[in-house]
Image (spheres, rainbow, N blue to C red):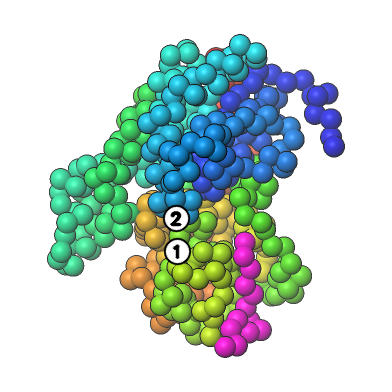
């Protein structure tokens, strides 16, 4: 094992990720980045969805909040799907005392520079304030989503979530004309969700600064809004260009398909993955299957256990599928797949990590969003950045096949892919010395050192 003690360490930073794959990945990428800049790193984490600590021997890990196996408040909560998000609500309600105790121990033993938490751990702001400890926030969605999330109560007042007339679904959203009303409805944000979102926004604005997994050239209008409306510094850092997220995967990764992928022609394979939480029913699953078959394109499809409701894995496949043109895996090192020259398109649920990783690798997208920020990302991907196709009408095999062929083989696909490559090139320039992304990282390090 490499001896990390020979490297002189600056002060310690404590990081506290939300225990979901899409939140753990960027937080541990940020931790690696800060470590590379000379800081010592402590990761606070729950037993629920705990990270693989053995992959990070250079970090100190501390259990917090649900480390008592007899605490029925946690043991009775769902472990799978969005129902497990109830755990976050409970942590926010009852975690302050335990976090304060843990931070007091850290502060008494070490020279701690600051606390970095996921924005959804909004209860941590009052704890940090009580200890005079600067708290930085990591936002794991895009910049343009932030003001949308802060406007959910407005959308409720406008009646968006109670519409029964399909004719209104295509209308532009008040304050956000890029979006359609149906995009807002598809987020699934109910009134009870609004308290989580409003607290997240309020306590992010009360923090010492916000770190975003993005870059200026992708989200310039969103950045202008953030800089105008939020009183704390913002730092835009494209984590996938600094560190892979492979080591932070909560699921075991299959690498056995790479020899097959290596044999495929450049830009000939559709990579299909719908994230770590989303689910479809058997009818939707079969529409996906037939859409892939009818597209006549080669594909690599990630189907994690539990993706099909009521199914452990592959019982629903028709005979002969996937055949010679397809490969099925449980989970894959996504950044490595997207960077592979054989990949021609990414069919995704549109979570921000997946969307942004695709942008970073210059891969065109097909989006089938489920909820949350995903329909907003899909709208920007298709209508603003114009680097993919948004499947807006759910799961229908004909539309699926047409979308795949549009990106992979039709004339439109050449322009879509060219725009995707151009965004990647803009990011590469931004990362060079003097570029916005380069300077943003340098500013973040100097800012932390000023505490």
Do labels 2 and 1 touch, CB within 8 Å? Answer: yes
Residue shown at 20%/43% (left/top)?
Answer: 154
Mark 1: which secondary structure? loop
Please tell me which residue is depicted at 61% across the width and 50% down the height of the picture: 250
Q: Which residues are magenta?
A: 319-331
Q: Which SS type dominates the magenta stretch?
A: loop
Q: Is any atom of residue 178 visible in this view?
A: no
Query: Could you tell me which quadrant the C terminus lies in?
Result: top right
In this rendering, position of residue 247 left or right of residue 346: right
Q: In the depicted view, which residue is nearer to us: 123 or 353?
A: 123
Give the vertical position of 114 relative to 17 (above or below): above
Seen in the picture, residue 328 relative to 318 is either above or below; the reply is above
Mark 2 lies on residue: 81
Position of 399 with respect to 275 (left or right) is left
Residue 333 x/y as whole percent: 65, 57
Disc 1 crowd, CA 10 A, few/some/many (<14, 14-19, 20+): some
Of residue 425 and residue 82, the one placed in the foreground of this image is 82
Q: Nearer the viewer, residue 79 or 20?
A: 79
Query: Where is residue 72, by image quadrant?
Result: top left
* Residue 328 magenta: yes
Q: Position of residue 178 (x, y in %)?
A: 30, 53
Q: Residue at x 65, y 27 (%)?
A: 41
How many residues crowd mark 2 within 10 Å: few (<14), some (14–19), many (20+)? few
Where residue 225 appears, as percent x and y from the top left, is: 34, 36
Between 353 and 440, the one lying in front of the other is 353
Residue 361 quadrant: bottom right
The residue identified by callout 1 is 279
Q: How many marks?
A: 2
As measured in the structure, the alpha-carbon distance from the residue carrying label 2 to the one carrying label 1 is 8 Å
Q: Residue at x 41, y 82 (%)?
A: 398
């Amino acid at each position: 094992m490499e001896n990390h003690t020979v490297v002189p360490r600056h002060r310690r930073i404590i990081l506290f990720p939300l225990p979901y794959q899409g939140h753990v990945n960027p937080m541990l990428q940020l931790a690696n980045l800060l470590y590379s800049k000379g800081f010592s790193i402590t990761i606070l984490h729950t037993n629920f969805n705990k990270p693989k600590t053995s992959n990070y021997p250079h970090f100190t890990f501390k259990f917090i909040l649900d480390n008592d196996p007899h605490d029925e408040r946690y043991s009775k909560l769902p472990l799978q799907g969005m129902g497990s998000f109830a755990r976050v609500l409970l942590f926010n309600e009852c975690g302050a005392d335990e976090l304060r105790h843990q931070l007091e121990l850290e502060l008494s033993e070490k020279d701690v520079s600051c606390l970095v938490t996921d924005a959804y751990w909004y209860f941590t702001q009052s704890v940090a304030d009580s200890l005079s400890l600067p708290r930085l926030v990591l936002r794991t969605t895009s910049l343009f989503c932030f003001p949308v999330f802060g406007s959910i109560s407005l959308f409720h007042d406008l009646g968006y979530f109670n519409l029964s007339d399909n004719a209104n679904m295509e209308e532009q959203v008040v304050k956000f004309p890029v979006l359609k009303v149906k995009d807002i409805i598809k987020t699934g944000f109910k009134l009870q969700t609004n308290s989580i979102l409003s607290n997240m926004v309020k306590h992010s604005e009360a923090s010492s600064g916000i770190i975003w997994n993005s870059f200026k050239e992708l989200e310039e209008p969103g950045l202008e809004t953030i800089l105008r409306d939020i009183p704390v510094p913002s730092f835009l850092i494209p984590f996938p260009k600094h560190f892979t997220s492979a080591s932070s995967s909560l699921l075991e990764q299959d690498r056995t398909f790479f020899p097959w992928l290596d044999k495929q022609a450049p830009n000939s394979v559709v990579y299909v993955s719908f994230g770590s939480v989303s689910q479809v029913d058997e009818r939707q699953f079969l529409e996906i299957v037939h859409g892939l078959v009818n597209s006549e394109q080669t594909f690599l499809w990630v189907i994690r256990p539990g993706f099909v409701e009521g199914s452990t894995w592959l019982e629903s496949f028709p005979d002969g599928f996937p055949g010679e043109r397809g490969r099925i895996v449980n989970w894959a090192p996504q950044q490595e797949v997207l960077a592979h020259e054989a990949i021609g398109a990414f069919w995704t649920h549109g979570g921000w990590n997946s969307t942004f990783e695709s942008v970073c690798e210059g891969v065109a997208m097909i989006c089938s969003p489920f909820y949350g920020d995903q329909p907003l990302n899909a709208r920007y991907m298709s209508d603003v950045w114009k680097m993919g196709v948004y499947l807006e009408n759910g799961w229908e095999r004909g539309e699926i096949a047409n979308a795949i062929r549009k990106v992979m083989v039709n004339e439109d696909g050449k322009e879509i892919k060219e725009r995707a490559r151009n965004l990647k090139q803009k990011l590469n320039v931004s990362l060079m010395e003097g570029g916005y992304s380069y300077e943003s990282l340098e500013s973040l390090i100097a800012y932390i050192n000023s505490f």
